[in-house]
């Protein structure tokens, strides 16, 4: 198997980190389901809804679900991609385009991570609370944004360097997204 940027030591370590945070994302989805079911039961069976459920879900759990799953989703090429013409382009052009795209994404994600970390520190120092029924701190939300964006930016850096090396050398050193599955592929597979 040729050495690609997706099976380098750095990428494997980053993959382990992505696995850890995506577990928190999955646990957050489970927590959302439990809170919603509990809230519905309390509301319709006992006429005592959980007044804090939407605040917990919107302020913490949804942020964890989204930001902690971003990088792992990119790693497995599971983000939505418009690839109508991508596989018809010359390989080097495709690698050059992906280098530019991942480099630009890195800059944006690093700005989001930096701003999330800045706001996390500020909210923690000022003891900022959500003004709702339960006054929960705001800093955990910013922390999750900072961590998730930072990990995603590391994955984009790995991809950017890999595609740049592929462009320069003319060899596929970075994984390209798999080609789209078509109706013909399903028919051939007997699905």
Image (tube, rainbow, N blue to C red):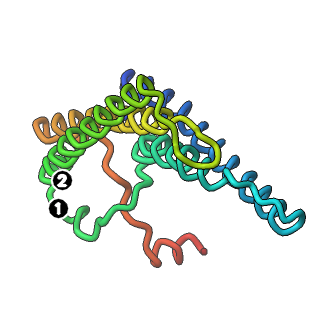
Q: Are there few (<14), some (14-19), or many (20+) residues within 10 Å of tag 2?
A: some
Of 72 and 62, which appears nearest the observer? 62
Of 73 and 171, which appears nearest the observer? 73
- When asked about the image quadrant of residue 118, the answer is top left
The secondary element bearing badge 2 is classed as helix
Instruction: Say how many tags the image has.
Output: 2
Q: Which residue carries the number 2 mark? A: 94
Q: Which x, y percent locates residue 155?
A: 34, 36
- When asked about the image quadrant of residue 117, the answer is top left
The quadrant of the image that shows the C terminus is bottom right
Q: CA distance from mark 1 to mark 2?
A: 6 Å
Residue 122 shown left or right of residue 172 in the figure: right
What residue appears at the point 27 percent right and 70 percent down from the top-left corner? 84
Q: Which x, y percent locates residue 179?
A: 36, 61
Of 44 and 129, which appears nearest the observer? 129
Residue 67 shown left or right of residue 39 in the figure: left
What residue appears at the point 53 percent right and 77 percent down from the top-left corner? 187
Location of residue 27 with respect to 33 vertically, above or below: above
| Res. 1 visible in picture | no
Location of residue 146 with respect to 131 vertically, above or below: above
Of 160 and 126, which appears nearest the observer? 126
What residue appears at the point 12 percent right and 53 percent down from the top-left corner? 93
The secondary element bearing badge 1 is classed as loop
The quadrant of the image that shows the N terminus is top left
Q: Which residue carries the number 1 mark? A: 89
Location of residue 43 with respect to 144 vertically, above or below: below
| Res. 123 visible in picture | yes
Q: Which of disc 2 and disc 1 is earlier in sequence?
A: 1
């Amino acid at each position: 198997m040729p050495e690609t940027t997706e099976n380098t030591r750095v990428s494997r370590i980053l993959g382990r980190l992505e696995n850890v945070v995506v577990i928190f994302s999955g646990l957050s989805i489970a927590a959302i389901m439990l809170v919603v079911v509990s809230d519905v039961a309390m509301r319709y069976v006992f006429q005592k809804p959980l007044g804090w459920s939407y605040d917990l879900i919107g302020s913490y759990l949804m942020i964890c679900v989204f930001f902690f799953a971003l990088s792992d989703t990119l790693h497995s090429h599971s983000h939505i991609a418009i690839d109508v013409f991508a596989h018809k382009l010359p390989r080097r052009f495709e690698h050059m385009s992906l280098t530019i795209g991942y480099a630009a994404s890195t800059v944006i994600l690093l700005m989001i991570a930096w701003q999330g970390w800045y706001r996390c520190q500020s909210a923690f120092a000022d003891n900022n609370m959500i003004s709702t029924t339960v006054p929960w701190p705001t800093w955990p939300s910013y922390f999750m944004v900072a961590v998730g964006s930072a990990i995603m930016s590391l994955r984009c850096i790995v991809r950017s360097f890999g595609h740049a090396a592929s462009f320069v050398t003319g060899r596929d050193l970075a994984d390209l997204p798999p080609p789209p599955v078509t109706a013909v592929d399903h028919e051939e597979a007997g699905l």
